[in-house]
Image (cartoon, rainbow, N blue to C red):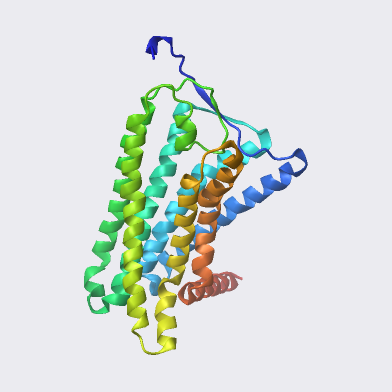
Amino acid sequence: MDQRNVTRIATIHLLGFQIPQSITFLVFFLFIMMYCVTICGNFLIIILVSYSKSLHSPMYFFLAQLSIYDILLSTDILPNRISTVLVKKTIMSFSECLTQFYFLVMTESSECLLLTVMSWDRYLAICKPLHYSLKMNYQVCWILVILCWISGFFSVFIYTLTMKKLQICGPNIIDHFFCDFVPIMQLSCSDTTTAHLELTVLGVFFVILPFFTICVSYSYIIVTILKIPSITGRQKVFSTCSSHLTIVAIYYGTLFCVYLVPRREATQTLNKLLSLLCTVVTPMINPIIYSLRNKDLKEAVRKLINNFLRINFNKF
């Protein structure tokens, strides 16, 4: 195509969900509440891990990092989602669209790596308990977390630069509630082979290999648990990784569904709902899953509340 005859669009229109006017404010209130629960729940996890000495362990250190990712992901997606409920259509520049896409993919990619690190932590704790303190010390934890951030940051940044070079000539309407890969590619009128190839590489490195590593880790964990003679012992050991396994199942399940469901008009609403589950619901329920299934976190919450009440009581 002659690049001189291409009119590059300047703005992107996000359609979001087509919600009946009668329930607009109900849906708006629902998303506001979801955002508040997500932010408060994940901040609570971060505060508890920082405050309580009983939670100063690699498992909870990684959990706090996961909460940071969830806060970033929900903040990247939900504000625009809330605005599309009220005005029915959100307008943003193409640069803003790419920025949203960058933080979305960077956060999701880094979170995949972090979930893999958490599975390795559980593998060492259960299968190699004598070497755990040596192989998973404070310094190693920080190195692993920094590698997760750096890998996601630079890899997705390079990919976003490739997308920025695409000729986007419209139509400038995206039938979604955020800027995702496929909707952006549908606006391009230039060759997208390089972009698709780089996305495949990112998918293998950040999704397929981490998921395979998690599966291998839990295969060894399950074998080790089955060797424990008592049922009580098995349940106690499995409880230390059941929350993480639940989050992995939900996160990867929705992630695979979002990008494996056929992109036809008949499934567009389903794609939106699955994307909503992956980018909005999952960050909200992660702290709930951990807090409901973890005695240490419950105890830390109880101590925090008691200390808060005691301090305020002494003031009066």
Which quarter of the figure is the N terminus placed in? top left
Whether residue 161 is visible: no
Task: Please tell me which residue is depicted at 52% across the width and 43% down the height of the picture.
Answer: 77
Whether residue 222 is visible: yes
**Where residue 210 appears, x then y in whole percent?**
33, 56
**Where residue 141 appears, x then y in whole percent?**
28, 62
Q: Is residue 174 left or right of residue 185?
A: right
Query: Which picture quadrant has residue 237?
Result: bottom left
Vertical side of 274 occupied by 133: above or below = below
**Where residue 115 appears, x then y in whole percent?**
38, 59
| Pick the front one: 52 or 79 | 79
Q: Is residue 302 left or right of residue 104?
A: right
Vertical side of 201 occupied by 313: above or below = below
Task: Please tell me which residue is depicted at 38% across the width and 25% down the height of the picture.
Answer: 166
Q: Is residue 215 left or right of residue 129?
A: right
Query: Which picture quadrant has residue 143?
Result: bottom left
Which quarter of the figure is the C terminus placed in? bottom right
Task: Please tell me which residue is depicted at 50% across the width and 62% down the height of the picture.
Answer: 287
